[in-house]
Amino acid sequence: MNIKLVRKVVLFSAVLVTTGSVRGNTFAYTNGNVLICFRKANPTTYASLGGNDLVVNAGPINYFTNLAPNTKVTITAYTGGQLGQVATNSVGWSTWAYFDEVADPTATNTLFMTKPRTSLNNQTAPYNIRNHNSYGYVIGELSAIVQGAMDNAGYSPYNSSLAVLESDSWNESEGLSLSYYNGLGTTFDFNGSFQADPEQYNPANFTTSGNPLRSDFYWLYPSSASNLKAVFLGYFELSTNGVMTYTAYPTPTVVAPTIISFTRTGSTSTVTFTTGNSGTYTLRGTNSLTSGTPSTNWPSVTSVAGDGSNHSLSDITTSTNKFYIITAQ
């Protein structure tokens, strides 16, 4: 076997290309769009308080992943009047995106999900990575929420192509078209399919408290490997006036990795490398070197978040000729 290791470091911004559109409705959704969802909720028990939900299309995921570190942008896809039809006090909200089987096969069953902060300036512990099938169940619930927004595009005169109000109790087509709340479920984890409650909860006095709330945004790529963690992308912040912003990669400059070793055992190739205290480090591999093809276009194998420690990433392959690099973003 002739395995070649390319000791090259590339720093780059990730691009996730969205493909495949949901058709036939005025709610403009495309596979991989980031959705922000609001519902009226008891801030202590998290139970539904009824009324309206609001589903907002904030744009394609690659817009958020291509932002330079520490870039802060305002979400303009919904208005104060639309949010006012739900509420700002006593509200639960989450942000998420997914790629399903309509997308590029290499991105199928990939999730992006918020995790609420309990302390404004402290990042949450990353979600645990799950396997392909596990994320498939979650996406089944998320796609029903998307369908519910499409089916309710004409529900309110406040609705637009990017923000749809709907009844909190909407449940049609035997669960294939759901309101945000019904898709989230009474266990607040997308009817038991996700590992945790992704919602941030505004207190009853949120608008007068003077304190914004933040939720961290994570990339959950499917993997059967154990002990992997989701990749931190940034955080969403809701101010007391109802305006939401997103801050990308609020970290220092990513430290370039150094490859320490390469091992091959059976059909498993393992690259060990250094990381900085932030950023995402990705193992990439290709079976051939084509002139003019940048290494950043090599297929991604798996990734890990930088924490200042050495990490090892592996690729299982029967190929007799393969090149590897580690990239950092």
Image: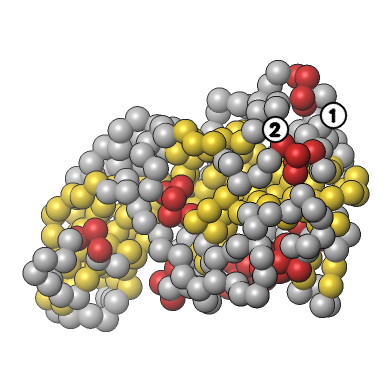
Q: Secondary structure at mark 1?
A: loop
Residue at image location 82% in from the left, 43% down from the top:
85
Please give the label number shown on residue 71: none
Residue 320: which quarter of the image? bottom left
Indicate whether 206 appears above or below 235: above
Image coordinates of residue 31 in percent, x first then y, are 54, 67
Res. 204 mark? 1
Name the side, left or right, on which 269 lies relative to 90: left
Tell me which residue sits at (41%, 63%) in the image: 17
Could you say which quadrant of the image residue 144 lies in? bottom right
Q: Is residue 315 above or below residue 305?
A: below
Q: Tell me if I can see residue 198 in this picture.
A: no
Please provide percent x and percent y for residue 137: 66, 70
User: Between marks 2 and 1, how big is the CA–CA gap?
Assistant: 14 Å
Quadrant in which residue 82 is drawn: top right
On residue 242, the disc is: 2
Label 1 sits on what residue type?
A: Ala
Disc nearest the viewer among 2 and 1: 2
Q: Are marks 2 and 1 in contact (CB under 8 Å)?
A: no
